Image (spheres, grey):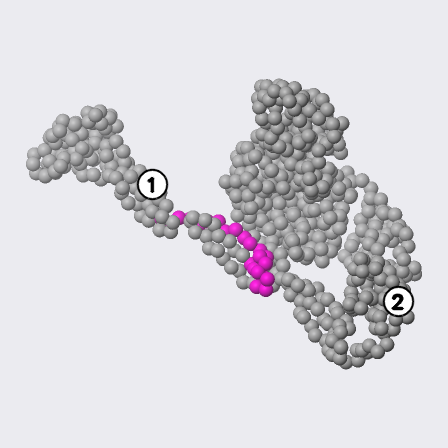
């Protein structure tokens, strides 16, 4: 995501990103040479000794903890001078990460943004802490659509809580919806659902409302649907969001955006691209408005990893201006790739069909004069060629380039203990060890494609089996392994041919529930019955307590009310509350002061009623005897001539 201003605390997160990137590429944390160090912000990758001078033998002032962000004021070799906790000293910079600026960003308004969903439980986030660490905006998941055969819409169980907490903390708020729409109608349904969730939360986003379009792990429905469908889904979702009065945007990963979305999808909408482990976002067609640079960010105010993004556009100001959508975002021209060299073995006379892809409204598009090969064909797969618009770079046509023919090499002799069948991929080490076939009529001989190294033929010398009688057996593919169709010679039991079939998709079983109770949440889980792979798991929030009717633990007195306790029948937890304290002069105990209390006290005084022991409320004047004076005082309390609280205070003072 993107941020408005580059916060000084955000340097911690950049350091984490750089550290992860270095670990990913090299497996170790590299140590920079002395010439690489310069003044500026650093994050310590280990606890460092803080010394009075730049020398390993110098006196130690203290220790600076790992993960601390420091400002280096002077550099001497691989030592840096800084001020820490009001003391000035030196540390070694060999185990620290500099906060490198993004040299491609010309605007000073750089924001840090975090995105959250139900996988970040409310109690795991300090929203005020986010602001203190420099996070200025959050993008919250409103919900999503199931993939595979489960196409139902679902709400993010923490969206409302997250949205209200973020708003209370003064953070800028955007929204996203995880889409699995495969047509415009489903996209509109998802947009309407997102709008309903925003309104249910009672917030007004001042950052974009995004469609999150990507394929879940192991599922490729969007990839199979193609660029036209994915682009149409984004268009339909964003236009519906715009009609509802919000700023629309599109989120996706770099590969998905470049492969399955036309660049024009981002025109007049916020662009948010995920690209990890790099120093700048590599989206080919334009600089995005927001760049999600890591999915493993670490913040002091969030328990666990969090997605972090940079934002380069002041969306709140744009939205507040009343003209939130730019007429046409700046996008550099798209230069088509150079025509590759001729492909060995390809048909030199192949010409793609002169027909455009279906359902494209070209308008004033100008097709380029030549086709551009974006994937070369091999003898294993087809290639891909395209034509673009010469003006805007939009892909207008796709066509498959036929596979090229295998190119057999010279016959090779196999060792006696090695058996290969046509279609096998010969290991490079074995291929290098083979020599041309000679006069040995008993040796096995193979030919191999010089391009893909596939075994094309396998033959044996004179006197060997001719494989005239064969049987074919089939092992069906499952979701955990490939299938195999194999033909075996029944005379010599040699495998004549073998064909591998692709794994099949997982089977979505019946939903299994871990029912929540008032002590903990539950889950709804779909598991493949073949391999037990969890295909979809949805968190179910904890149920409400089932409290009993209140029970009196201690009775009411003049100083405090009765202690009432309710007990949950499920988990045994209790909830306490207090009633009202006794009223002085309330002889009948109904919680009210009335003439009936005065009459009853008078009856007590003359012996017409018996009351033993005398309750403290029946003696409002506190003289230890129920008499006519108490009846008169009760009557004055009932008609408002005396203040019950003053009488209560006097009685309590008299008992001390």
Q: Could one spot residue 270 in this view of the protein?
A: no
Residue 601 in the image, given as x and y percentages of width and height: 13, 34
Q: Earlier in the sequence, mark 2 or mark 1?
A: 2
Observer-side mark, 2 or 1, equals 2
Residue 63 in the image, given as x and y percentages of width and height: 58, 26
168 sits left or right of 490 in the view: left
460 sits left or right of 74 in the view: right
Within the image, what quadrant is residue 53 found in? Answer: top right
Q: Where is 307 relative to 494, above or below? A: above
For disc 1, the neighbor class at 10 Å (few under 14, some 14 to 19, many from 20) is few
Residues in magenta, as a range = 526-547
Q: Nearer the viewer, residue 646 or 384?
A: 384
Residue wearing tag 2 = 437
Residue 437 in the image, given as x and y percentages of width and height: 88, 67
Residue drawn at x 70%, y 46% is: 253
For disc 2, the neighbor class at 10 Å (few under 14, some 14 to 19, many from 20) is some
Q: Nearer the viewer, residue 533 or 146?
A: 533
Residue 25 in the image, given as x and y percentages of width and height: 72, 42
Residue wearing tag 1 = 576
Disc 2 on helix, strand or loop?
loop
């Amino acid at each position: 995501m993107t941020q408005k201003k580059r916060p000084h605390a955000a340097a911690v997160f950049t350091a984490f990103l750089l550290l992860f990137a270095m670990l990913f590429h090299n497996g170790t944390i590299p140590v920079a040479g002395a010439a690489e160090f310069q003044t500026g912000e650093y994050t310590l990758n280990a606890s460092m000794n803080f010394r009075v001078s730049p020398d390993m033998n110098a006196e130690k002032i203290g220790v600076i903890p790992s993960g601390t962000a420091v400002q280096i004021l002077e550099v001497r070799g691989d030592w840096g001078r800084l001020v820490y906790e009001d003391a000035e000293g030196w540390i070694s910079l060999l185990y620290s990460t500099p906060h490198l600026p993004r040299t491609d960003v010309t605007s000073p308004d750089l924001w840090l943004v975090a995105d959250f969903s139900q996988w970040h439980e409310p109690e795991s986030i300090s929203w005020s802490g986010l602001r203190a660490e420099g996070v200025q905006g959050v993008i919250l998941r409103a919900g999503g659509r199931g993939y595979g055969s489960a196409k139902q819409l679902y709400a993010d169980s923490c969206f409302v809580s997250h949205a209200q907490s973020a708003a209370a903390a003064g953070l800028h708020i955007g929204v996203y919806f995880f889409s699995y729409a495969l047509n415009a109608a489903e996209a509109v349904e998802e947009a309407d659902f997102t709008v309903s969730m925003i309104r249910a939360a009672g917030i007004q986003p001042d950052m974009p409302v995004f469609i999150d379009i990507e394929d879940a792990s192991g599922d490729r429905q969007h990839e199979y649907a193609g660029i036209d469908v994915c682009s149409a889904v984004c268009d339909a979702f964003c236009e519906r969001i715009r009609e509802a009065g919000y700023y629309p945007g599109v989120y996706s990963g770099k590969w998905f955006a470049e492969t399955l979305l036309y660049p024009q999808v981002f025109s007049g909408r916020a662009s948010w691209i995920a690209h990890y482990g790099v120093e700048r976002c590599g989206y080919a067609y334009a600089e995005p408005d927001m760049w999600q640079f890591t999915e493993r960010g670490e913040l002091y105010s969030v328990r666990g990893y969090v997605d972090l993004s940079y934002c380069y556009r002041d969306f709140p100001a744009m939205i507040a201006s009343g003209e939130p959508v730019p007429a046409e975002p700046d996008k550099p021209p798209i230069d088509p790739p150079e025509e590759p060299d001729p492909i060995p073995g390809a048909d030199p006379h192949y010409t793609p069909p002169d027909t455009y892809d279906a359902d494209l409204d070209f308008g004033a598009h100008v097709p380029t004069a030549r086709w551009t090969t974006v994937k070369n064909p091999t003898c294993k797969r087809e290639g891909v060629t395209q034509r673009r618009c010469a003006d805007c770079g939009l892909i207008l046509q796709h066509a498959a380039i036929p596979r090229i023919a295998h190119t057999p090499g010279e016959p090779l002799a196999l060792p006696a203990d090695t058996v290969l069948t046509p279609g096998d991929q010969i290991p490079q080490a074995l291929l290098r060890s083979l020599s041309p076939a000679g006069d040995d009529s008993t040796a096995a001989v193979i030919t191999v494609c010089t391009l893909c190294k596939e075994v094309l033929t396998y033959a044996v010398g004179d006197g060997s089996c001719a494989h005239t009688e064969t049987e074919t057996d089939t092992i069906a593919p499952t979701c955990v392994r490939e299938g195999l169709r194999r033909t075996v010679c029944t005379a010599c039991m040699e495998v004549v041919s073998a064909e591998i079939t692709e794994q099949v998709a997982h089977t979505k079983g019946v939903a299994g529930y871990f029912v929540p109770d008032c002590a903990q949440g539950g889950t709804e889980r779909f598991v493949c019955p073949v391999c037990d792979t969890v295909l979809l798991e949805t968190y179910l929030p904890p149920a409400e307590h089932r409290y009993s009717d209140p029970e009196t633990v201690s009775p009411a007195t003049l100083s405090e009310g009765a202690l009432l306790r309710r007990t949950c029948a499920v988990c045994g937890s209790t909830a306490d509350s207090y009633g009202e304290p006794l009223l002085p002069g309330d002889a009948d105990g109904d919680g009210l002061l009335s003439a009936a209390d005065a009459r009853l006290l008078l009856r007590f005084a003359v012996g017409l009623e018996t009351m033993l022991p005398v309750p403290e409320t029946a003696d409002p004047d506190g003289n230890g005897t129920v008499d006519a004076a108490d009846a008169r005082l009760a009557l004055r309390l009932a008609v408002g001539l005396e203040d019950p609280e003053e009488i209560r205070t006097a009685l309590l003072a008299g008992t001390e």
